[in-house]
Image: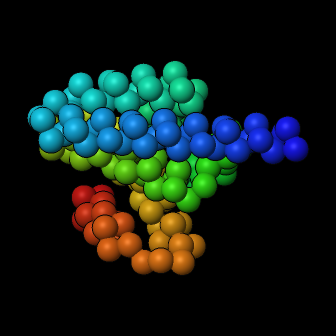
Amino acid sequence: MEQEDYIKRQIEQLGKVLGKLLADLIRLKTSGRMSDGIEEADQALKTELDLDITSLTLIPAEAFLSSLLAVRKFNDKHFEQLADILFLIAEELYTSHSDSLRMKKLYERSLIIYEVLDKTSSTYSFERHMKIEKIKKVL
């Protein structure tokens, strides 16, 4: 019972961290300070989840989801939030024409998550579908 409570608290904490990080990135993007947001996102991921953007891009694409599941108890909502974070950062790199290799890898990782969610989710997400299409055009 205690173990279940601990795992539940960890999953809830993961959701809070990813949700706050995503909200902060959206706020910074809206205010035109997205480059600051990338550094903040990287630091928050590293501090709170022991993940960082660089390590996420180094995981081979075919092992990406299984690697995340091995490290954390991700659920669909967490995966969606992480994909949105990676997508926003990739968009900023694309817009600023900087670090095209990193941008490509971030788009690829978010696409992996979005496509799996698209196949496994019981509800259709128009927003997710639009992001998938945008990524495919860029790549």
Closest to the observer: 84 or 101?
84
Residue 40 in picture, x, y percent from top left: 34, 25
Image location of residue 136, percent across then percent down:
31, 65
**Can residue 139 be seen in this snapshot?**
yes
Q: Quadrant of residue 59?
A: top right
**How many marks overall?**
0
Nearest to the observer: residue 28 or residue 102: 28
Whether residue 68 is situated above or below residue 131 in the rendered picture: above
Residue drawn at point x = 42 percent, y = 78 percent:
124
Residue 109 placement, left or right of 126: right
User: Is residue 101 at all visible to an observer of this figure?
Assistant: no
Q: Quadrant of residue 111?
A: bottom left
Q: Quadrant of the N terminus?
A: top right
Above or below: residue 61 compared with residue 41: below
Image quadrant of residue 133? bottom left
Q: Residue furthest right?
A: 1
x and y percentages locating residue 134 in the rendered image:
26, 64
User: Picture coordinates of residue 57 (x, y %)?
Assistant: 47, 39
